Amino acid sequence: QVQLVESGGGSVQTGGSLTLSCATSLLTHWRYCMHWFRQAPSMKREKVATLGMADGSTSYANSVKGRFAISQDNAKNTLYLQMNSLKPEDTAMYFCAASNCYSSPDYWGQGTQVTVSS
C-alpha cells in the first residue's frame, strides 16, 4: 500500500525557513512525479513544486520560485521541500502527492500545516 507521510510543518516568522519532509517508497519508481501542493483556507489547492523521478527535473509555481527547493534522498525514502524567505501568504496546509507525470495525483499525504506570521 502506497503511503505518503508528511512532517516538518510549524509556525515561523516572515523571512524564516522550514523544511518539509515526505516519507514514501515511491522515490525509486521512475514513472512517477512527486509534488508538493498547498491549500490555504477558502483557496484552491495549488501545486507548489514537482520533481520527476525519471530525470530529476524540477518545476515550481511562480509564487515560490527562488525561495523553495524540492529534493529527494533515496537512501532515506524521503522527499523534501526546503522553504526559505517565507511570507505570510505561504501559510497553508502542505501536501505531498504522487502521480504518473501526465496525470493528476493518485496518492496524497495527510498534510502538514505551515503558518507564517508577520
Image (cartoon, rainbow, N blue to C red):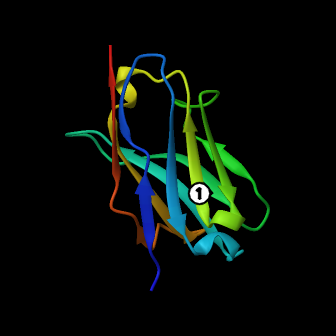
Q: Quadrant of the N terminus?
A: bottom left
> Farthest residue toward the right?
55
Q: Position of residue 68 (x, y in %)?
A: 58, 34
**Mark 1, residue position:** 79
> Farthest residue toward the front?
76
Q: Residues within 10 Å of mark 1 (few under 14, many from 20)?
A: many
The reply, left or right, for residue 97 in relation to residue 81 is: left
Name the residue located 61 percent from the left edge and 31 percent from the top edge: 65
Q: Residue 10: which quarter of the image? A: top left
The reply, left or right, for residue 106 in relation to residue 34 is: left
Of 14 and 100, nearer the camera is: 14
Q: Position of residue 64 (x, y in %)?
A: 54, 31
Tell me the kind of residue under disc 1: Leu
> Farthest residue toward the bottom?
1
> Farthest residue toward the top?
118
Q: Position of residue 101 (x, y in %)?
A: 62, 67
Q: Residue 100: which quarter of the image? A: bottom right
The reply, left or right, for residue 44 in relation to residue 14 is: left
Name the residue located 41 percent from the left edge and 16 percent from the top edge: 14
Of 32 and 79, nearer the camera is: 79
Name the residue located 69 percent from the left edge and 74 percent from the top edge: 28
Count of marks overlaid on the render: 1
Q: Quadrant of the C terminus?
A: top left
User: At numbered mark 1, what does the secondary structure look like: helix, strand or loop?
Assistant: strand
